[in-house]
Amino acid sequence: MRRRPKWKGNLKLNYQILDTLSLLTHLTYNDNYYDSSIPTGMVKMKGDVQIYISSLWQLSSKVAFRFAIKNICNSKTEKAIGFNNKGRSLSANISENF
């Protein structure tokens, strides 16, 4: 079947470093799978491993800072034919609860 790897899994680890600081690590694995399009027909797609790390720092009871690195290994495998993975990305944000 299209886009259905034989093996797929993920592992999450959340570590509370301090009362105000936590770290989340997320690892995903997808085995090889088949996909198709009109120009290419059926193609065997390469599986991949991706790692995400994020942290949450609770600055006060209302303000939090989040930082994340997605796809640390910079995997650029296609998720579907013709749609490339954008690679590694960083994000940071500050939020306030009212």
Image (cartoon, rainbow, N blue to C red):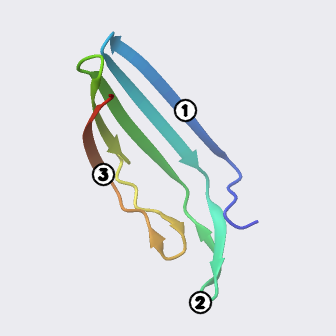
Q: What residue do we see at 32% from left, 52% from top?
A: 88
Q: Secondary structure at mark 1?
A: strand
Residue 4 position in % (x across, y down):
70, 59
Q: Secondary structure at mark 3?
A: strand
Could you tell me which quadrant the C terminus lies in?
top left
- For badge 3, the amino acid type reads Ser
Residue 57 image-quadrant placement:
top left
Identify which residue, 61 or 87, lies in the foreground: 61
Identify which residue, 45 or 79, lies in the foreground: 79
Residue annotated with mark 1: 11
Could you tell me which quadrant the N terminus lies in?
bottom right
Q: Gap in Å between the C-alphas at discs 2 and 3?
A: 31 Å
Q: What residue do we see at 26% from left, 39% from top?
A: 93
Q: Residues within 10 Å of mark 2 (few under 14, many from 20)?
A: few
- For badge 2, the amino acid type reads Pro
Residue annotated with mark 3: 89
Counting every numbered tag in the picture gives 3
Residue annotated with mark 2: 39
Earlier residue among tags 1 and 3: 1
Q: Gap in Å between the C-alphas at discs 1 and 3?
A: 20 Å
Identify which residue, 46 or 54, lies in the foreground: 54
Residue 35 position in % (x across, y down):
64, 71
